[in-house]
Every structure is written in structure tokens, then in C-alpha cells.
Image (cartoon, rainbow, N blue to C red):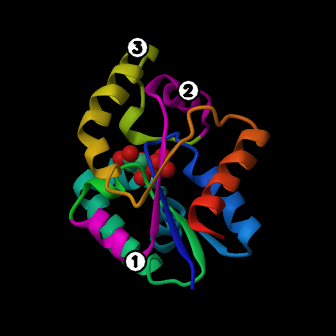
Amino acid sequence: MIRIILIGYMGAGKTTIGRQLAMTLGLQFYDLDWYIEMRYHKKVSEIFAEEGEEHFRDLERRMLHEVAEFEDVVISCGGGTPCFFDNMDYMNQQAETIYLKIEPEVLAMHLKMGRTVRPLILGKSEDELLQYIKDSLVVREPYYMKAKHILDVSLMDNFEKIAITINLIRERLGL
Ligand code: S3P
């Protein structure tokens, strides 16, 4: 049985890498945000706006406990998932956890280009975004660093680099 969970900041490429990794290994792919949206028939941004972050974190924890029971899966979680409750310890118990580590400048670039509506960074200017990423990484990185595997993927922004990252993960996990 294989279960892999990808963690990392918003814009780290968890979904892109996760989907591709699952396809390569013949596993099912789950994105925790999408799973929440499917179960609750609401966008993550709507849950934040209508019910607040605290409520979202509660749902997120409960949904994590559902998907992290599935077998032969790759799961990408939200950027904040590891940083609330005992989620990170739980994920380490359940899966091979991989932290996709990226420089703040590269994250900012990915987030600027991204089409996903992300409530935590909505309406921020470029400077504000970079500062926000740096500040929140100080708080979040200690959680992320608890992952069983840490992979520096700062350079991952095209298909070749995605393929390289997938190979690195396979090597690391012996798959
Ligand atoms: C969040 C990241 C988002 C989503 C929500 C909160 C965070 O997921 O769960 O907007 O706290 O970093 P992505 O990392 O997939 O953008």
C-alpha cells in the first residue's frame, strides 16, 4: 500500500506535481481543497468568506482524516493544512509526507500567475504578497520541516522540471 501526501506553501506546485506523480505511479490523486469543495458543494474561497477561517480549518481537518485513510493514493493538501491541530503528526503517521520547498520569490511568481482564488492573499500588491509569504513562512516552515522528506523544488516551472521532481520523489521513496 502506498500513500503519499504533498505539503508546502500555496503556489509550491503540490497539485501539479501530485497529479503527475499519481499518474506515473498508477495511483489515485486527491487534492484536499477539491475534496472539501466536492463534499460541501462550496468553493474554499466561499467557505472562508461566509463561514470564516476557523470553520474552514475544522472542515479541513475532518476531510484530511477521510482522504488520509484511502489507500494507494497521492494527496496534495492545502498550504495551511500541516499548521493546524495535530495535522502534521497525523499525516506523518498515515503517509510518506513530502515537503515541496520553494523560495518566497518563486512562490510569489507562481501565485501571481495562478488562476486559483486564494482568500489569504486576495487583493495584495506584489510587494505585500512577497512580504506576506516571507512572514508566514517563518511561522509555517517549522511544521513543514517535520515532513519525512524535504525536496527543494525552487526551479520547478516547466514540464521538464516537473518530470525531474517526479523522478526525485520516486528515487527518494524507492518507487
Ligand atoms: C491555504 C491554502 C489553500 C487553501 C486555502 C488556505 C493556506 O490551498 O487550502 O486557501 O492556508 O495556505 P493551496 O495551498 O492549494 O493554495
Q: Earlier in the sequence, mark 1 or mark 2?
A: 1
Kindly report the distance in space between the C-alpha atoms of the residues bearing marks 2 and 3. Answer: 11 Å
Determine the secondary structure under disc 1.
helix
Front disc: 1 or 2: 1
Image quadrant containing the C terminus: bottom right
Whether residue 122 is visible, yes or no, is yes
Image quadrant containing the N terminus: bottom right
> Is 60 left, or right, of 68 in this rendering?
left
Label 3 belongs to which residue?
A: 127
Task: Using a 10 Å C-alpha cutoff, classify the residue at mark 3 as few (fewer than 14 neighbours), some (14 to 19) or many (20 or more).
Answer: few
Q: Are marks 3 and 1 in contact (CB under 8 Å)?
A: no
Taking the spot 30% from the left edge, 63% from the top edge, the residue there is 88
Whether residue 45 is visible, yes or no, is no
The label number, if any, that marks residue 112 in the structure image: 2
**Residue type highlighted by circle 3:** Asp
Q: State which region is magenta.
A: 86-115
> Is 91 left, or right, of 1 in this rendering?
left
